[in-house]
């Protein structure tokens, strides 16, 4: 988390999962969802990457 706070641009956007200020960073088997527009950096979720992300985030499966 310290590395992410020091360089919040290391994550990437996933428009199919979340728009706006949310970014995603994969660390081993975990996906960290965070907001880049808040000070300090706001961690929204930490999810195992093998899970069904769209259903967890409340998005329709297409």
Image: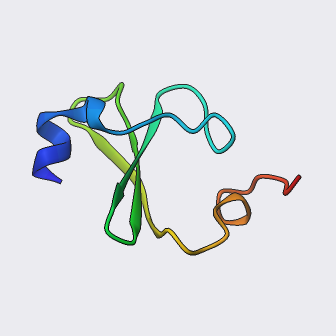
Relative to 60, is 33 on the left or the right? left
Residue 48, image x, y percentages: 47, 73
- In percent of the image, x 61 and y 39: which residue is there? 18
Foreground of the two, 9 or 58:
9
Residue 42, image x, y percentages: 32, 43
* Quadrant in the picture for residue 8: top left
* Quadrant in the picture for residue 41: top left
- In percent of the image, x 77 and y 52: which residue is there? 59
Residue 22, image x, y percentages: 48, 36
Foreground of the two, 62 or 40:
62
Instruction: Name the quarter where the N terminus is drawn.
Output: bottom left
Relative to 62, is 24 on the left or the right? left
Residue 32, image x, y percentages: 38, 56
- In percent of the image, x 60 and y 74: which residue is there? 51
Q: How many marks?
A: 0
* Quadrant in the picture for residue 6: top left
């Amino acid at each position: 988390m310290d590395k992410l706070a020091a360089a919040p641009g290391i994550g990437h956007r996933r428009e199919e999962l979340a728009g706006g200020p949310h970014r995603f960073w994969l660390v081993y088997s975990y996906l960290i969802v965070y907001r880049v527009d808040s000070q300090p950096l706001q961690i929204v979720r930490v999810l195992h990457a093998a899970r069904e992300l769209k259903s967890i985030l409340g998005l329709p499966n297409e």
